[in-house]
Image (tube, rainbow, N blue to C red):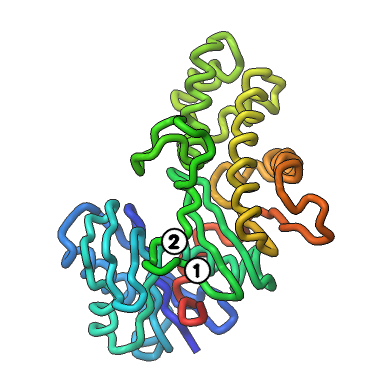
Amino acid sequence: MYYIGIDIGGTNIACGIVDEDCRIVASSKVKTNAPRPYEEILGAIKRSVRAACEQAGIKPSDAECIGIGCPGTCNRESGTVEYSNNLGFVNAPVGRDIEAEFGIKTYLDNDANAAAFGEFVAGAAKGSRNAVVITLGTGVGSGIIIDGKIYSGSNFAGGEIGHTVIVVDGLPCTCGRMGCFEAYSSATGLIRMTSETAALNPKSLTARLIEQDGRVSARTAYKAMKQGCETGKAITERYVKYLACGIANTINIFQPDILCIGGGVCNEGDTLLIPLKEKVAEQIYSKNSAKNTEIVICSLGNEAGIIGAAMLHRG
């Protein structure tokens, strides 16, 4: 038995054929080339499905169902992407159009929800009942699983943890608010923090690494810190302080069994995770409880979106 999972991104459209054990047995990738007309992107999605099926040696109609993870506000009931600024979609009937094309039941949800569900059914959150997955990338993406089901609120726009405020009147966020968790704890926020602090400390190893590499990444400060740079150490400690604040807020609201964090900066492993856990433990309301949320790093990487989309029928 096979399921088709489609992960639509601003750069690529990835499609995978997923078996009953949540393993990807075949996959394909095409360029999104957004922004461009909806019909052209829809055509690219269809091509990616056919290419993945051909690689797996099946017809699309052989699959039990199709699941789609897409950026933006996705109305699961109507199969419509109500709004996606990255793709330029406004009331785009992606789910309905794909279902009509291939003749099998098609499910649609936000891409962060799909990735979170992937970790829930097959990754770091497998075996839990309640989970939160937070991705630290260009922004801060998040997905919430309650009693085994994706939570997206009454209007399919819930779970935007990245747009909760952690610094009142703080830095401007792309959403229009000031001081959002995303502005401080995304990879973009860490890069900004690193650039600004290095500029104030031009003789530091952090500044020299930026000059040598010709760019700043989310791992520059960590690289410098590991080589004994005090500036790098100060940047990473400040970053963890903000990250811990947002995560503690999330735990205080949901008290999930497990909270998974993902994104490139999480490749730092325990260098990030150990001080983060210590800071969170100081701030959570439930610090004296017998059971507390486990904080772990996501395990599926880029496969989470495909697997989660393919399994949306379970969520």
Residue that badge 1 annotates: 151
x, y (%) of residue 93? 23, 73
SS of the residue under disc 2: loop
* Up-down relation of residue 3 to residue 178 (above or below): below
Amino acid carrying label 1: it is: Tyr
- Residue drawn at x 26%, y 56% is 87
**Nearer-the-camera pick, 24 or 161:** 161
- Residue drawn at x 34%, y 78% is 77
- Residue drawn at x 75%, y 41% is 282
In this rendering, position of residue 53 left or right of residue 217:
left
Specify few, some or many for label 2: CA neighbours under 10 Å numbering under 14, 14-19, or 20 or more. Answer: some
Q: Which of marks 1 and 2 is nearer the N terminus?
A: 1
x, y (%) of residue 27? 43, 70
Disc 1 vs disc 2: Cβ atoms closer than 8 Å? Answer: yes
In this rendering, position of residue 162 left or right of residue 89:
right
Amino acid carrying label 2: it is: Gly
Between the residue at mark 1 and the residue at mark 2, the CA separation in whole angstroms equals 7 Å
Asked if residue 29 can be seen in this view, the reply is no
**Nearer-the-camera pick, 162 or 124:** 162
SS of the residue under disc 1: strand
- Residue drawn at x 57%, y 42% is 265
* Up-down relation of residue 38 to residue 33 (above or below): below
Asked if residue 169 can be seen in this view, the reply is yes
Q: Give the label on residue 158, or none.
A: 2
In this rendering, position of residue 39 left or right of residue 217:
left
